[in-house]
Amino acid sequence: MEEVTHLVMHALEHAFWDTLRLVPFLFVTYLAMEAIEHKAGDKAEAAVQKAGKAGPIVGAVLGVVPQCGFSAAASTLYAGRVITVGTLLAVFLSTSDEMVPIFIAEQVPVEFMAGVLLAKLAIAMVAGLAVDFVLRHLHRDGDHKLHIHELCEQEHCACDEQHSVLGSAIRHTLQVTLFILLVSFALEIVIDAVGEDALAQFMAASPLLSVIAASIVGLIPNCAASVTITQLYLEGALGLGAMMAGLLVSAGVGLLVLFRTSRPMARNFAIAAALWACGVLVGLALTLCGF
């Protein structure tokens, strides 16, 4: 019983601090969205649509900055259709989560770390631009218009009645933060119960299987995924291809926020599948090339 209590408290502590670090990103994002809706109106919608084609480039650059909050912010912006699918995918692919701090702590050569970040940046840009290009030509991008009010209706926040930018932003932030905390807590319990050694054995079965395994672990919407993958690479349990597959897919809690705030749900699954496919294809290519 004492062991179970320790496991629960340990998981709760990690989930609390991981979630707490996201609150400023979520709040600023919702505050900006509400300000756009209340102040800018049609002008903001026109500006977003004009900049849409360059969105994946901007998203990839912002996503590569070593922090785990921007992917959550990007998911929120996509839920309000402020950014395109390609931009969201670019952010997810370039996000490094906890990789950079671990590389620095382990004194990994700056040249190697910069190479990994640049590779993620380039892959994110190409994938995001390609997705938006295909969707435009398939005429599937017509819903990328600013409809933050629909997000408000979905969350039942009664923003229109409150007429308060600050109040609406706080309410959105609290709702999403609670959801992330609960799911992160459950994931921490699973990770602590299974153990990193078991994950290492699962991912190191064979070079090609390790790519698939790392990409599956990378989908876990928790900072622990990128930590585990990076550490396993530094310990020699994973090759470069498997590491890249896992880290490209690892978008922190971005996927959690996406599934919590965006509809239709089928499109969320499609985005997650595209993210996973990109990671696997890059990882397999690197592995087959001997990296």
Image (spheres, grey):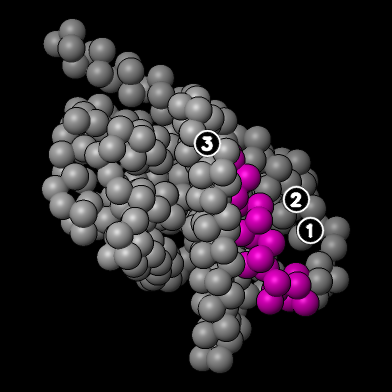
From the image, tell me which residue sits under label 2: 32
Q: In this rendering, is residue 213 above or below 181?
A: below
Judged by depth in the image, the label closer to the viewer, 3 or 2, is 3
Q: Which labelled disc corresponds to residue 249?
A: none
Residue 162 is situated, as x and y percent measured from the top left of the image, at 73, 48
Q: In this rendering, is residue 22 above or below 213?
A: above
Residue 18 is situated, as x and y percent measured from the top left of the image, at 48, 30
**The magenta stretch spans which residues?**
48-71
Q: Give the position of the N terminus as an image quadrant.
A: top left
From the image, tell me which residue sits under label 1: 36
Nearer the observer, 168 or 240: 240
Instruction: Check disc 2 and report its element: helix, strand or loop.
Output: helix
Q: Residue sitting at 21 percent across and 54 percent down?
A: 207
Q: Are marks 3 and 2 in contact (CB under 8 Å)?
A: no
Amino acid found under the numbered disc labelled 2: Ala
Amino acid found under the numbered disc labelled 1: Ile
How far is mark 2 from mark 1, CA to CA? Answer: 6 Å
How far is mark 1 from mark 3, CA to CA? Answer: 42 Å
